[in-house]
Image (cartoon, helix red, strand yellow):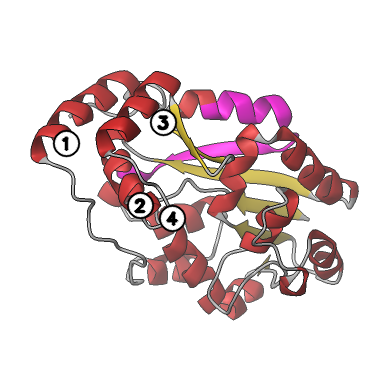
Amino acid sequence: MKVFIHAGSHKTGTTSIQVFIRENEDALKTAGIFIPQSGTLNKKSGHHNIGWEMRNDPRFKPERGTISDLVEELAQRSESTAVLSSEDFEYFVDRPDALTRFEDILVSNGHDLVYIYFFRRADIYAVSLYAELLKHGLDYSFRKFALEALLKEKVVIKNDWVFYFNCRAFIKKWRKHSRGTITTISYDHAVGGDGVLPSFFSFIEAPAELIQLSKSAEVKNVRKPADVSRIERAIFGWLLRRRFSSTCRLPAD
């Protein structure tokens, strides 16, 4: 079976994609695209528990579904394609041990892996991600956050929550350790075009009626921007754009 694995990045419409695929499981199944239940936390969540299991994250709960449950579930299906989605898979990039274990299990059971990774313009991504991480224990200033991104090309919190700003470095490192293929999609191009969901569903070759339906889907998890001063937005935004704008061939203004 071909397994599409939506691996983030954070703050690029991941929740919207996860809710939509769970709400439209039957329509996708009719089109030959299966959405597993194993590893999901509720009726609208992504497959976060699988990522947590692979990384030994304390949030992992076996009763929510394990990688073994996932393999068994896939083995019972007749569809040609399956989709997993969790931005927690993004963290595998700096955890090759977790990525290798994950792939060994799926590949040994006959599955072909195709990863999908959305990237976002660095300056906008920084403000959005900073606002999100403040809710998860980040306790330092946007200035320090932006400087870390500029100096290290990524921000790391909680030991292995890793957020790359250099998309090219992310892809290079991922490909070094992965046996699957990975495709990048520009979040900014998608938003300026048909939308993030239609871009995703077009890539997985969903039926036209579902792609059309996704165009009018509600955007989920929209957060209030972080309280970052205009001066900091301007200065660090310019620096981030200058530093990272070419790493995934992002368009200039």
Amino acid type at mark 1: Arg
The residue furthest right is: 108
Mark pair 2, 3: CA separation:
18 Å
Residue 238 at x, y = what percent? Answer: 19, 25
Q: Amino acid at mark 2?
A: Leu
Viewer-proximal residue, 52 or 117?
52
Q: Quadrant of the C terminus?
A: top left
Please name the residue that numbered disc 4 is placed on: 136
Q: To which residue does mark 3 refer?
A: 165
Q: Which residue is mark 1?
A: 233
Q: Of the residues under marks 2 and 3, which one precedes in the sequence?
A: 2
Residues at circles 4 and 2 in contact by the CB criterion of under 8 Å:
yes
Residue at the (71%, 38%) spot, across then down: 180
Classify mark 2: helix, strand or loop.
helix
Relative to 25, is 72 on the left or the right? right
Q: Which residue is mark 2?
A: 134
Residue 104's place in the image compared with 29, above or below, is above
Q: Secondary structure at mark 4?
A: loop
Q: How far apart are the two marked residues, 1 and 2, measured between alpha carbons? A: 17 Å
> CB atoms at circles 1 and 4 under 8 Å apart?
no
Residue numbers of the magenta segment = 170-189
Sooner in the amino-acid sequence: mark 1 or mark 3: 3
